[in-house]
Image (cartoon, rainbow, N blue to C red):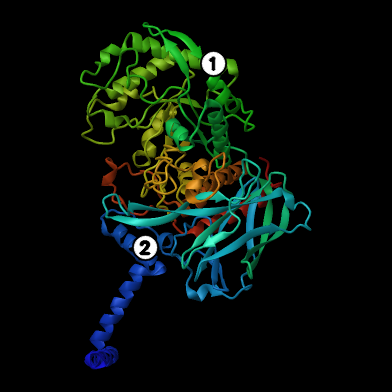
Amino acid sequence: MKIDRHPKTISFLTGFVLGIFSVILMGLSIFVVPDLRNHVKELARNFLKDHHPIGSFRKIVAEAKNDVKSRPGATVIPSKFLDFPFPGNRAESSNGILSWIAPFSMRIRPDDRPPRSEIGKPGTSKALRLVGLKGETLSFQIVLRANQSKKVHVVLALDPSEMGSSCLVVHRFLEWYITFMDRATKDGPLRTITNPDPLIPFHDPYGTGATLVSKVSVKDDSNQVVWIDVKMSRNCQAGIHHGTLTLSTKRHIIRKTSVVFEVLNAVLPRTTSLQRWMELYNTRFWRGEMIKNDDEYRRLYQRYFLVGQEYGFDTNTSNLLDIRWDGTGTPTSVNWDNYDRTFGPILSGQLTGSPPHAWCLPIPTYSLGGSNWGGFTIYGQSPSPIQNWTGIPDIATRNLAKVIVQHWKEKGWNLKNAFAYIWDEPEHQLVYYPDTYKLIANEAISLHKGSKELNVMITDTPYITYKNQVGHHKSVMSGLIDIWAPNSEYYVPDRFEKERKRGARTWFYQNGPPFIGRSNLDTRGPGFRMWFWAAWKYKVDGVFYWASTFWNGSTEGNNPYHNPGIGDGIVFYPGKQLHLIGYPDIEGPVPSIRMAQWRRGYEDYKYFVLLERYNKKSIVEQTVDSLVQKALNPNGYTPAWRDPDWQRPGDWSHDPQAWHRTRVQLARKISSLVGKTKN
């Protein structure tokens, strides 16, 4: 047997030696032959561009910048908007764990990491300073990365010896990562992306305060991020407070970083005139939270509304009105009991301290004429001719308006901020019902005949957005719509002036760059935050996102934590589905990074309002223009894809640190004005 194996052994050793010799020769040839050396260097450089996280990020930035400049007439985006240093800071490495601080507007992907040159030794980081006004929430992120799986305690503790520090409230959240498929541009190839969005609270905020996250599990060579909110109460005393951010394992203190909380001598306004709304999809809400009865629905919905208010928006459904009709368009019975029990405490201001600033009335979208309304419908093989609106459909619509407005007045609820969302993107209906705009005009006339105090909202513009648009001209709706709320790519500010002079309000909703910040999961920059800067810049009356709870399901393989698509229409995550990702369920919503973006944007907007009160509107304009040079569709390209910037990065800063520095500068400016100028 030994004799049989001997030749194979000799053959193996000979091949092994020859292989090593070949590698050595190849290595020597790289240094000796210049062309070969340059070729290998280029291969290595390209590999790092594609696979190293910093190199990959820079490659994307370079491609975006070249892409912007490649089309005639395209905006030349300032290089500082796209090309900026790594936004993270205060990186330290200790006991196999790398940690660093990330600013609010940075979305941390699993492979992001600071350059080696920025990683310091334990305890070498300077203090983290949080500067803000009374009544606002300041946020930052602590990123953890380990060379092997570990569990880490993350604590931000206030100095207990300092008087008045109880006015600062700290909340910690675990960022949950979601993997999804998306395109860099609308027509580009699909790519796999992993981004965080759900913010899982460390403790149950709705029940006993039970612990949900005791230790942070850091996986091998992958980031895990903790989001930290610090709420500065409105009754805080201006001054300095101190705290310590501590990271520890079972055996070691990994990090101790001092945190300075600077409360400035100014109070953030409670609210502004800007309306902010998201639709709550009722059926998906029931299914996603696995609701069993009306009482449970009422309790959960009110918690969702409260959390939405904390993050700067109102959310509700247009359903729940129980009304019966006879054959003449006259209501025979109206039961408001369930509606009043569920929504009454909100509409009266009892639940939150003030009534909502945007509220969708109980007239479901498309219900007037879309379905069989008084015998009128646009669907089926025999849609109703537009002339048939006269009669029962008209009478029923008038009576519906009367019933709703009468109840609102009896209850003393605010009608000014309420609206009937009667049609969504009606241009899509024109293909099979060319008289859609005439129908909308008829519905608006009928509603206003029922009550002139009822506001009509549609997601469209008063002008044609396609030259060859099917159907009659939109002028039939002019003067009849109270709230025009188009997609951001169709929002041409100058073309709304005529309607605004008639008293109409204008809103916009999502679409993405180059018109407005991304609203889905694939957000790397300011996202929702810059919406509010665009709203100020173009004097918009309201912003809304089309849905807050467009969840796909509640099973192991079909839920918003694992496969929400690109997250479109989802900002809340269902608390009763946390068990699907290994955490205890809670009786209320799980917020998200995108909700925090929205809140930060609205609080920025409140800064603008304060500065305007102090006669510093010029400072606001200069500041907004410095970070947002262009948004929406100010040049009036129709259709929008004719815009030379189509599918390119927005003409606003994508640098998280620029947004952070600018906010702090504005906060200090506001503080300096307190007491010097009358409101």
Instruction: Note whether 4 is above or below 294 in the view shown.
Output: below
Q: Quadrant of the C terminus?
A: top right
Is residue 279 at least partly visible in the picture? no
The amino acid type, in three-letter code, at marker 2 is Val
Q: Position of residue 650 (x, y in %)?
A: 38, 52
Q: Residue 234 versus residue 114: which sits nearer the camera?
A: 114
The amino acid type, in three-letter code, at marker 1 is His
Mark 2 and mark 1: Cα distance apart in space: 55 Å
Residue 549 lies left or right of residue 154; in this view the side is left
Q: Position of residue 559 (x, y in %)?
A: 42, 44
Name the disc covering residue 152, or none: none
Which element is circle 1 on? helix
Q: Residues within 10 Å of mark 1 (few under 14, many from 20)?
A: few
Which element is circle 2 on? helix
Extreme residue in the front direction: 1
Residue 163 lies left or right of residue 245; in this view the side is right
Q: Quadrant of the N terminus?
A: bottom left
Q: Position of residue 152 (x, y in %)?
A: 59, 63
Instruction: Note whether 132 is above or below 428 in the view shown.
Output: below
Which residue is at 39% across, 11% downward? Answer: 396
Q: Residues within 10 Å of mark 2 (few under 14, many from 20)?
A: some
Q: Residue 633 versus residue 88: which sits nearer the camera?
A: 88
Which residue is at 57% across, 71% downward? Answer: 92
2 or 1: tag closer to the N-terminus:
2
Q: Which residue is mark 1?
A: 407
| Count of marks, rendered view | 2
**Front position among marks 2 and 1:** 1
Q: Which residue is mark 2?
A: 61
Q: Position of residue 669 (x, y in %)?
A: 62, 53
Q: Residue 601 versus residue 400: which sits nearer the camera?
A: 400
CB within 8 Å, label 2 to label 1? no
Instruction: Write down the quadrant of residue 215 in the picture.
Output: bottom right
